[in-house]
Every structure is written in C-alpha cells, then in structure tokens.
Image (cartoon, rainbow, N blue to C red):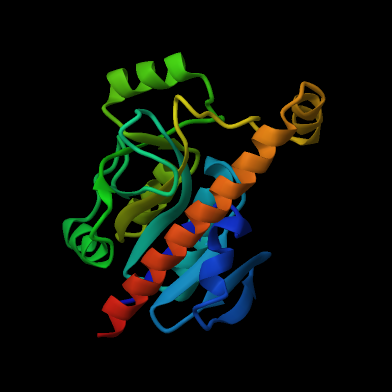
Amino acid sequence: MKLGVVAALSQELAPTLGTIATVARSVEGLRFRESPSLIFVASGVGSRTAAAAALVLADHFKPDALLSVGFCGALGEELGTADLVLGGTTNHPAEPSLLALARSAANTSRSGNVLTVPKVVVDAAEKKELARKTGAVVIDMEADAVAVAAKARGLGFLAVKAVIDTPEAPLASTYAGCWTVFRDLFRGSVMGMIYDAKRVKLASERLREFLVALRDRLAA
C-alpha cells in the first residue's frame, strides 16, 4: 500500500523527513518527498492549497489513499498538547481499514472527527460552541479539502492530527500574517509565542512517531 501525506506546513513534517529516507521530486511547482510507501507534500495553509496539492499528489503518484496530517486545535479540555486524533471530518468519514491500520500504529491515539474552519480559532467560547454544533473534537483548516480530493479520485481518506492548543491554553496569536504577529508581539505575547513554538515541536515529534510506525506497518 502507498499513502499520500498532505500537510499544510513544512514544520509539521520536518522531524518525519529527518527520519524517513525520501527522494525529492518537484511536480507542478510543489516539492514532494517520496519513500516506498509514503509520499509527502506541504501544501500551504488553507483549503484551496490543500485541495490542489492533494489532487497533484493523487494524479502523479497514484497512492491508494490520502492522509491529511498536521496540527489542530482541541475543542475540549479532554485533549492536551501533542495528543493524536485519528478519524474523518464532520463531512467525510475515514476509510475503515485505513483507520484500523492507523490505530495499530498509534495505540494511545484518540478517535474523533475534525472540523475544518477557514481561520484559526482561539476563543474558548467559540470552540465550545463549535463542538456543540458539530460533534467534532478538533479543528483544522485543511482536512475537509483533502477528503474531497480523495473522494474525487476514488481514494481512501484519513485525518491524522496532533493537538497544539486547547480552549484553556489558546495560541498566543492567530498567526494570520506578519502584521498580526507584530501586533500580538507589541501587546506582550512574546512568552506566549515561545510557548507556542514548544508546543509545535512536541506535536511535530508526535506526528513523526506515528508516521514512522505507520511506515513500519506498511513495510511488514
């Protein structure tokens, strides 16, 4: 089995690509990293870029399924930083055999649906309301788009998300561009951003652990 792994940010994949040997290949302006069983791409943030990268990956590398992999925000306090969530989205279920395979590679993971939103959400009340309305356990900005691309190409789909922030410990900034970051720094969020960087490191290492274990399952 060969799986396509679509992340938004290179930071989400950096520890994994430092562990799994890959060959780089550029296709339609995107840089892919290919191993025998996993093909990686960092699409950029948001649904449009995620969908485009997922379709290029599907068409050029012919995987059996697509995974939306990366960071997420927890909608409840039952999850903490670097906890791993496996599942589908609120609109598209995970492919059952793929979910079972992923669970075998991550015994301590949580199952649940991802809600894809158009922007970073940091407000605790807003997160609580999103959880109530949708039943999702985490939010991201790309999973649903990857799921749509997988469906369009007749491929299986799975979301694999590592928690960064929670309602009680939100991100120090929405990181929506340089001006937003500068404004939040000016407001005194320096220590919060340092803490965010530590959370990013923990979450990316958790993704590495999972993807290496998944690679090993696929090779067995």
- Residue visible at 77% across and 21% down? 187
- Residue at 54% x, 81% y is 22
Confirm whether residue 7 shows in the render. no
State the residue lying farthest toward the front.
Answer: 191
From the viewer's side, name the closer residue of 199 and 17: 199
Direction from residue 132 to residue 120 in the image, left or right:
right
- Left or right of 151, for residue 73: right
Residue nearer the viewer, 113 or 60: 113
Judge whether residue 138 can be spotted in this image.
Answer: yes
The number of numbered badges drawn on the structure is 0
What quarter of the picture does the C terminus occupy? bottom left
- Give the image quarter of residue 78: top left
In this picture, residue 35 sits left or right of residue 191: left
Image coordinates for residue 159, horizontal then vertical, percent: 35, 51
**Residue at the spot x=38%, y=58% of the render?**
67
Q: Position of residue 54 (x, y in %)?
A: 48, 58
> Image quadrant for the N terminus?
bottom left
Q: Quadrant of residue 135?
A: top left
Say whether residue 159 is left or right of residue 26: left
Residue 170 placed where, x, y %?
Answer: 53, 28
Task: Please tell me whether residue 42 is drawn above or below residue 191 in the rendered image.
Answer: below
Vertical relation: 94 (above or below) 19? above
